[in-house]
Amino acid sequence: MEWWEVLVQQTINGLTRGAVFALIALGYTMVYGIIELINFAHGDVFMLGLFVSLSWFTLLGATKTLTGLQLVTILPLVFLLTMLTTAALNVAIDRAAYRPLRRSTRLAPLITAIGVSFMLENVALLWKGPAPIAYPDVFPSVDILREWFGVDSAIFVTTKDLLVVGATIPLMLALHYFVSRTTWGKAMRATAQDRETAEAMGINVERTILMTFFIGGALAGAAGLIQGMYYNIGQWWMGYQAGLRAFTAAVLGGIGNMTGAALGGLFIGFLSAWSDQYISARWTNAIVFAILILVLVFRPHGLMGEQTPEKV
Amino acid sequence: MRRGLPWTALLVALILYPFVDRALGFQTVHAVSDGMIYVLLALGLNIVVGYAGLLDLGYAAFFAIGAYSMGLLNSPVLGSPLYGHPWSFWLCIWLAAAVSALLGVVIGAPTLRVRGDYLAIITLGFGEIIPVAIRNLGDVTVEIGSWRPIERLNLTGGENGVNPVGRPYLPSVPFETDPVPWYFLILIIGAASLWAMNRLRDSRLGRAWMAIREDETAADCTGVNPISTKLLAFALGASFSGFAGSVYAAKLQAITPGAFEFQVSIMLLCMVVLGGAGSLKGVILGGMLITLFDRVVLTQTTFMVRAFGRTTGVTALATADLTLWRWFFFGLGLVLVMLLRPEGLVGRRVRPAPITAADLEDGLEVAPAPRVDAIPAWLRERAQGGVAAATPILDVRGVTKRFGGVIALNEVDLLVPRGAIIGLIGPNGAGKTTLFNVVTGLVRPDGGRMIFDGGSLVGLRPNAIVARGIARTFQSIRLFQNMTVLENVLVGEHCRLAASVPGAVLRPPSVIAEEGRARVRARELLAFVGLGGQEDELARNLPYGDQRRLEIARALATEPRLLLLDEPSAGMNPREAETLTELIGLLRRELALSVLLIEHHMEVVMGISDRITVLDYGTRIAEGTPAAIQRDPRVIEAYLGTGYEQDLAGRESAR
C-alpha cells in the first residue's frame, strides 16, 4: 500500500469508529447537560446494547447474513427493539440509582454510577462469559470499490461502512430536530439551563430527565448494534473502554454541547485510528487519555464549550 | 484512663494475633498482612478524598508508583546498584515514598485548575495511563525511518513485571520464610501512618483540607491557599501509597502491571466510602470489612453453597462460584452505601437539626448586644499596632470590569480612609458585589489601580489579599457547613499560623503553644459576637442570624484591617439589624477597623456610614456624606425612589 492509501484507509476506519463514539458521547453529554452527572454506566449500556441486539436477532431467527427483504424488515425492527430495551434499562438505572440522590452532593451519584457500571459489567461477564463472543455477520459485506465501481484499489470500503454512516446520520438529525424543534426538546434545553426556573415555569423536570435518559439509552443501544454488526465481536469489558473514549469525546466537544459531542466522537475516532497506525495500538489508550487531560486542564469547557464563571 | 483501655486491648490483641494464629494453625497471617496493606492504601486515599474532598479515581497509579519505585531500585532485574545490601530495603522504602509524593505533585498539578467531577476524570486518566506506560516501557524501540536510536530498551520490566525484589533484612529475623515478621512490619508502618494522619487532621493543615472540601472559594477568601493545600493532599496521600506499594512489592517478590488496574482504585474507594470518608476509624473498618468479604466471605460461602448443592443434588449450586460475583458485589455495595448511608458506616451523620419550639423562640429573642469589654484583647493589640497615617487604607482608581458585552464596573473610584465606615449602595445589578470580588481578588479587573495600605492588589490571589489584611463576608452565607463553629473560626486564623507538615505531625512545643493560642482566640471571638457555648455545633445547624455572625467572626479571625461586609443584615429582623449596627460601630470605634459595607437596609447604612458611594449600572453616580446622598436627585432617581425624603422624615417624626 502507498502511504496515502494507508492514510485514506485509516481515516475511513476512524470515521466508522468515530460514528460509534459519537452516538455514545451524545448520551453522556445530554445527561451531563441536564443533571450534571458523569453517567459512568453509560458505556456499559452500550455494551449491553450489543448483547441485547444479538439476542433479538437470535429470537427473530436471523443468525445468518440478511438478504434483500430482510434488510428492510428485520434490521429496522432489531434497531427499534434494541433501542427500546437499552432506553428502558437506562431509565431504570436513573430511577433506581440516581434519582434518590438528586438533592445530594455532586459526588454521590457519580460514585453510584461507578457502582452501577461494575454491576452491569459483572452481569455481562456472567451472562456471556469472559471470552469474546462472536457476533453473526448479519449485514452483507460488499467491497464497494471493486464490486460496484470496478476500481482495483488497495483501499477497502464496504457496505458496512455505509451502514455505519447511513445509520448514524439519520439518528443524529432526528435528535437535532427533537431537541431544537419540539416542545420536549425545549423543555430539555430549559431544564439544562436552570432546573429550578424550568420547574417554576411548569415543566415537569423529572419527566424531562426521564426522557433524556431514554434517548441517551436508545442511542447507546443503536451504537451497540452497529458495533456488533461492524466488528462481529463483543466482550463484557468493551463498554468501559468505549465509554471512556466517548466521554473524552464529549469533554472535547464541551460537555453538554451536542454538536460538540458528535464532532468530538469523530475526532477521537480519527485520532485512535491514526495512533494505531502511526504510533502503536498499545499506546493509543494512553494518548487518548493524555488528550483528555490536556483538554480538561487548558480548556476545561471543551474546545466548543462556553465559559461559565462561578457565581459568588 | 478509661478511654485508653479499649486501645490497649486492641493493641494487645494485634500483637498476640499472629502467635494465636500459629498455635491454632489457622495460617491466616499472610492474608491478613495483605489486607492491611490495602487498608493502609485506603487511609492514604482518605486524605485526598475524605479530607480534601478531591475524588481520586486513579489512586492505584500511586500504588503502582510506590511498588515500582521499590521494584526498580531494589531488584537485580535492571541492575540497580542499591540491590543486595542489608540496608537496601530500609533506604528504598523512603525513596519510594519520596518518589510517590513527587509524582503525586506532578499528577496533582494539572488538576489544580479543575474542580469536582472533571478532577475525578483526570485522575482516572492518569490511573489508565500509568499501567499502559509501565507495560509499554518494558520494550521501547524508537524508529525514525531506518534509524533506530533506541532499540528494545527495558525501563520497567514490561508485561513480565519485576522479579525478584529485595527483601528487608534485620539480623536473625526470618523475612524469607515466615509471614509473622511481615505482619509486624506492616503493623508498625500502619500504626505510624495512622498516628501521623490523626495529628495532621487536627492541625492547621487538616482544617485547610476540610475547608477546601466544603467550599473552595470561601476557603480562598478566608486565607487558605487552595493550590498548595490541594498539592499537599495529593503529595501526602501518594507518599502513604509509596510505603504501602514498596512493602507490597517486597512481600510479594514480584510485581506486574496487572495489579494496579482501575478495579484496585475502585476497591480502595469502596473502602473509604463504605466506612465513611474523612473518618480514620471508618476507613479502617471499611477496609477490614471489604478485605474480609473479598478474601473470606466469598470463598467460604462458595464452599457452603457447593456443599449444599452436592447434598441436595442441585448441580447449579454444586458448581456455583460466588467469587465471580466479586465486582458485582463491590458495585452493589457502592450503590447501597450511597443510597442508604452516604456518610458511611461510622461517618458523622449530617442532617439539619430538627426545628423545635425553643429554636423558634430563639429567633425572636434579641441577640445579645455586643459589649466593649468582650472585645478580645489580642484583637485590640493588633489594632494598636497600626500606624494612624493620613493615607487611605484602600484606594481604588478607575477600576473597570467587563463580562462579555456588559460593563459591570466602569472606571469606578473608591476611597476608604483609615478607620472609616464606607457604605456602598445602588440598585440590584449595579456592580456592588463585583466591586467586592475585584477587591478581594476573585475577579481580575480589566483596568484600574487598587492600592491597599501602600501596596497594589491587582493580580493577587484571594488568599494573598486576605494575608495582607482584607477580610470579607458573602451575600449568600458561605460557611464551611460540615465543620464545627470553632473550626470555622480556626480556618480564619489559618494564614496567621505557621505549622508545617513536620510541625503538625511531631508537635514541638512551639506548635502546641500556637495551636492553643489559636483556640483561645477563636473562643474569645465567638463569645464576642455572641456565639459563646456553641463551639462544637456544626455550622449548618446554626439559625440564620447566628450563621451571619459566625461569618463575621471568621472574617475577624484573619486579623483584617479592612472588613468587607456584603449585605450583612439581609434577612435579619429590625432588632437583629440594630445589634449588627452596634457591632460594626464597636469594631470601628474600639479597633480602628475600616469597613466597606454593601447594604440595602437604609437605616443601617445611613446610620453608621461616614461616607456613601452610590453605584448604578457599574458607574459611580454619587459620593458623599449620608445626608448629602439622601438629597442627591440622581441617587433618588436611580435608587432611593422619589418620596424617600418624605418617608424618612415621616419615620423620624413618628419615633
Image (spheres, coloured by chain):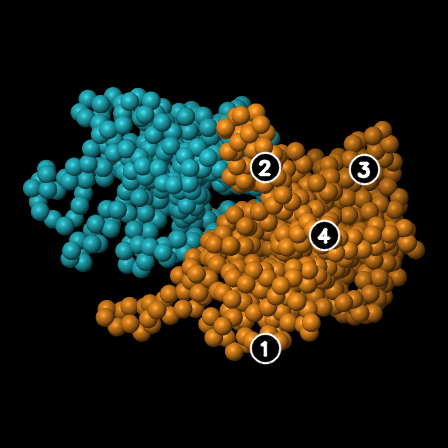
Chain colours: A cyan, B orange
Residue B460's spot in the image, x, y percent? 60, 63
Q: Write down the residue under mark 2.
A: B303
Same chain shared by disc 1 and disc 2: yes
Q: Chain of mark 3?
A: B
Which badge, 4 or 1, is on the more N-terminal residue?
A: 4
Q: Earlier in the sequence, mark 1 or mark 2?
A: 1
Whether marks 4 and 2 lie on the same chain = yes
Residue B567 locus on image (x, y percent) = 71, 45
Q: Dot 4 corresponds to which residue? A: B21
Residue B539 location, quadrant: top right
Which residue sits at x=21%, y=50%?
Answer: A9
CA–CA distance between discs 4 and 3? 71 Å
Question: Helix, strand or loop at disc 4?
Answer: helix
Q: Is residue B274 visible?
A: yes
* Tag 2: amino acid: Phe
The kind of secondary structure element at disc 1 is loop
- Mark 2 vs mark 3, foreground winner is 2
Q: Is the residue marked by circle 2 packed among few (<14), some (14-19), or many (20+) residues within 10 Å?
A: some
- Few, some or many C-alpha atoms within 10 Å of disc 3 (few <14, some 14-19, many ≥20)? few
| Foreground pick, B540 / B269 | B269
Q: Residue at x 92, y 55 (%)?
A: B373
- Circles 4 and 3 on the same chain: yes
Of tags 4 and 1, the one toward the viewer is: 4
The nearer-to-camera label among 1 and 2 is 2
Task: Give the residue type that dot 4 points to.
Answer: Asp
Of B517 and A246, which appears nearest the observer?
Answer: A246
Residue marked by disc 3: B574
Going from the N terminus, do you reach mark 1 or mark 3 first? 1
x%, y% of residue B8?
83, 55
Where does label 1 land, which residue? B85
